[in-house]
């Protein structure tokens, strides 16, 4: 644990530097045990300490973009003792969470949102006559998302006092104009210059001739600055631009933040940092340490073999398909490693496109490619595809364009929690006219379904699969809408994807209790062909549908409607899903147990139903 000073506003520069070193050591120690986002947090250590020296997070609103760089913030706001529970069930979230602390200003897990939130909070402050400062901290990667520019445009125009800190850790967003620009930038950030600038403005505005002189000199200065310094974009939007500044100089950052705090109107501070700073393995390979599992802090090597998973099988299969069809292209929104597209990018560089954190643009770009005869395959996490719903409808579906959506991280994803679980795509994809949604339960089925989606299917088609690997079911049920994996007479168990493993396990347990369960696996959930399920329910009289999905428009709801329309009398219909909630964090196994989606919970639920039926007698039917 760390010894955190009681009042960070009072510590000296030397003490701040020592604290930064201790935080960096603690970060490596914690994340090596819990997994999480390491490189981004290492790069933001000095910036976080400087923010806490200048602002009061229990009052001022510090809004992180994405939020995966908030670990030091948590340590500095009374949660260091709990850091060993980071991202675990019942422990600290890996993202800002107001329910944990008043110092967490906003729940966030997706990129490019911070400035929009900041503008809203600043305007609320004005309307309610409150006294607090608003700070938005975003990385340069967030500027690949259009929402960031919408927020910046409005923030600059608003005139509201707020500070946007641009953490530039590698993306080239400034012009390379050499030593003159660097020299001028350094001069502009010296204390003497900042003090002179404030005094000069105050004196010159005190009399009319002075105001005229100030306007002329300001115009000349602006012209020179726009020629030599990388700030015109933000100043054109209405910001006072400061920087670029060394993001690992906690002394200079603290001084500059104090100056920015006292300026009126919107201010943008441009900070340059190194992702993974201070930990050699992360500096050498920041991509690998962006989101990492448990590792040996001495070497940086993973403690657990990664093994095979659905994302890798997808990438390998897509490469095979691309070898025989030159029209196939792969698209990602800043998730090349996470979606398994490394090998495709290396093997087919001219047919691979990473558009940055811009899911809406990715979908519409794919529509344009498909309209002109290319076969675009967009690999995207389920919770990120939500951001492109409008484009799915208006740019893809209306024209019936053949775009393949490979929906990774479908269902419960584990430790990243509420903002990352892929539990809504089942419902919203079904609302897209002409959409086909396929659900492989094994690696073999993923290969079969992906080939069908790319080479045979027409119109928009999604192939959804979970994070991680396959379970005990490793067969290939082909492309029929549904298949009966196990016959039974007492209850019908229905599922899709890897959830089928829990259903098969429940059926085995039920057999020991003399309950015969029929297990039906759905290969396609949109369009949904209910025939096999209806025939089974007519026989068994009982139905349980298990799915890692929100309840709204889930498969179980649609099957229930089909049963009602067919006038089938069922003794009991159980929809075992995630309800109307945002599931918490924890391992997938823990969450399945918590929400009744593991084999034991399903079997227990059916045993309860059977006992109730036997107790009630024939009248219950």
Image (cartoon, grey):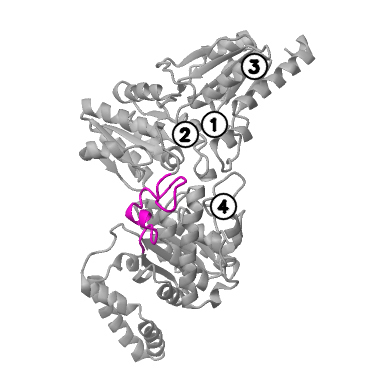
Number of residues whose C-alpha sits closer than 10 Å to that of mark 1, classed few (under 14), some (14–19) or many (20 or more): many
Q: Quadrant of the N terminus?
A: bottom right
Give the Cα distance between marks 1 and 3. 21 Å
Name the residue at the front extreme.
298
Q: Give the number of callouts.
A: 4
Residue 282 is inside the magenta segment: yes
Which label's residue is closer to the chain start, 2 or 4? 4
**The label number, if any, that marks residue 410 in the structure image:** 2
Q: Mark 2 Cα within 10 Å, few/some/many (few <14, many 20+)?
A: many
Provide residue 484's location: percent of width, then percent of height. 51, 12
| Residue matched to label 3 | 510
Where, by quadrant of the figure, is residue 157 drawn?
bottom left
Between the C-alphas of marks 2 and 4, the distance is: 27 Å
Residue bearing the label numbered 4: 84
Mark 4 or 3: in front is 4
Residues in magenta? 273-302
Q: CA distance from mark 4 to mark 3?
A: 39 Å
Residue 242 image offset from top left, x and y in percent:
36, 72
Q: Nearer the viewer, residue 438 or 444?
A: 444
For the point 51% across and 63% down, the residue is 62
The residue mark sitting in front, 1 or 3, is 3
Q: Secondary structure at mark 2?
A: loop
Q: Judging from the image, what secondary structure is the residue with disc 1 in? A: loop
Q: Which residue in the protein does label 1 denote?
A: 548
* Relative to 104, residue 343 above or below: above
Q: Position of residue 180 (x, y in %)?
A: 22, 75
| Label 4 crowd (10 A; few <14 / some 14-19 / many >=20) | some
Mark before the other along the chain sequence, 2 or 3: 2
């Amino acid at each position: 644990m760390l010894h955190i000073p009681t009042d960070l506003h009072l510590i000296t520069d030397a003490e701040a530097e020592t604290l930064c070193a201790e935080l960096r050591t603690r970060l490596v120690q914690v994340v090596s045990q819990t997994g999480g986002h390491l490189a981004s947090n290492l790069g933001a250590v000095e910036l976080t300490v400087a923010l806490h020296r200048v602002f009061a997070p229990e009052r001022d609103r510090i809004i992180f973009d994405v939020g995966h760089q908030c670990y030091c913030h948590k340590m500095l706001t009374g949660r260091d003792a709990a850091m060993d529970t980071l991202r675990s069930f019942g422990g600290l979230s890996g993202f800002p969470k107001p329910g944990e602390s008043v110092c967490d200003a906003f729940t966030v897990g997706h990129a490019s949102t911070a400035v929009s939130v900041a503008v809203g909070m600043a305007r609320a402050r004005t309307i309610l006559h409150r006294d607090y400062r608003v700070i938005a901290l975003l990385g340069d990667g967030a500027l690949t998302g259009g929402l960031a520019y919408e927020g910046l445009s409005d923030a600059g125009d608003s005139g509201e006092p707020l500070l946007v800190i641009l953490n530039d850790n590698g993306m080239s967003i400034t012009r390379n104009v050499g030593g003159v620009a660097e020299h001028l930038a350094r001069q502009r950030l010296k204390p003497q210059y900042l003090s002179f600038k404030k005094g000069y403005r105050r004196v010159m505005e005190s009399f009319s001739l002075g105001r005229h002189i100030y306007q002329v000199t300001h115009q000349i200065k602006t012209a020179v600055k726009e020629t030599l310094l990388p700030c015109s974009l933000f100043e054109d939007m209405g910001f006072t631009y400061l920087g670029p500044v060394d993001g690992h100089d906690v002394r200079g950052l603290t001084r500059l933040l104090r100056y920015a705090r006292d300026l009126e109107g919107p201010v943008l501070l441009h900070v340059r940092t190194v992702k993974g700073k201070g930990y050699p393995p992360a500096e050498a390979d920041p991509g690998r340490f962006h989101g990492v599992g448990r590792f040996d802090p001495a070497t940086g090597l993973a403690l657990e073999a990664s093994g095979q998973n659905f994302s890798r099988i997808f990438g390998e299969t897509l490469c095979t398909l691309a070898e025989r069809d030159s029209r196939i292209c792969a698209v990602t929104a800043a998730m090349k490693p996470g979606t398994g597209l490394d090998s495709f990018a290396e093997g087919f560089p001219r047919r691979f496109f990473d558009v940055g954190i811009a899911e809406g643009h990715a979908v519409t770009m794919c529509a344009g490619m498909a309209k002109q005869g290319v076969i675009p395959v967009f690999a995207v996490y389920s919770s990120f595809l939500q951001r492109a719903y409008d484009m799915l409808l208006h740019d893809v579906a209306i024209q019936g364009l053949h775009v393949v959506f490979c929906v990774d991280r479908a269902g419960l994803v584990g430790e990243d929690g509420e903002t990352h679980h892929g539990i809504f795509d089942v419902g919203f994809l079904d609302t897209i006219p002409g959409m086909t949604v396929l659900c492989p339960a094994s690696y073999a089925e993923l290969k079969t379904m992906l080939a069908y989606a790319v080479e045979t299917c027409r119109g928009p088609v999604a192939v959804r699969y979970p994070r991680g690997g396959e379970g005990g079911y490793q067969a290939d049920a082909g492309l029929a809408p549904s298949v009966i994996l196990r016959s039974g007479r007492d209850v019908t168990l229905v599922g899709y994807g890897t959830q089928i493993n829990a259903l098969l396990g429940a059926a085995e347990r039920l057999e020991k209790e003399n309950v015969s369960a029929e297990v039906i696996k759905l290969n396609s959930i949109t369009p949904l062909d209910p025939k096999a399920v209806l025939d089974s329910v007519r026989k068994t009289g009982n139905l349980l549908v298990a799915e890692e999905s929100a309840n709204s428009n889930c498969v179980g709801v649609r099957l229930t409607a089909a049963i009602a329309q067919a006038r089938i009398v069922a003794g009991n219909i159980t929809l075992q899903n995630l309800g109307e909630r945002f599931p918490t964090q924890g391992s997938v196994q823990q969450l399945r147990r918590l929400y009744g989606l593991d084999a034991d919970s399903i079997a227990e639920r059916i045993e309860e139903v059977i006992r109730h039926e036997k107790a009630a007698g024939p009248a219950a039917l």
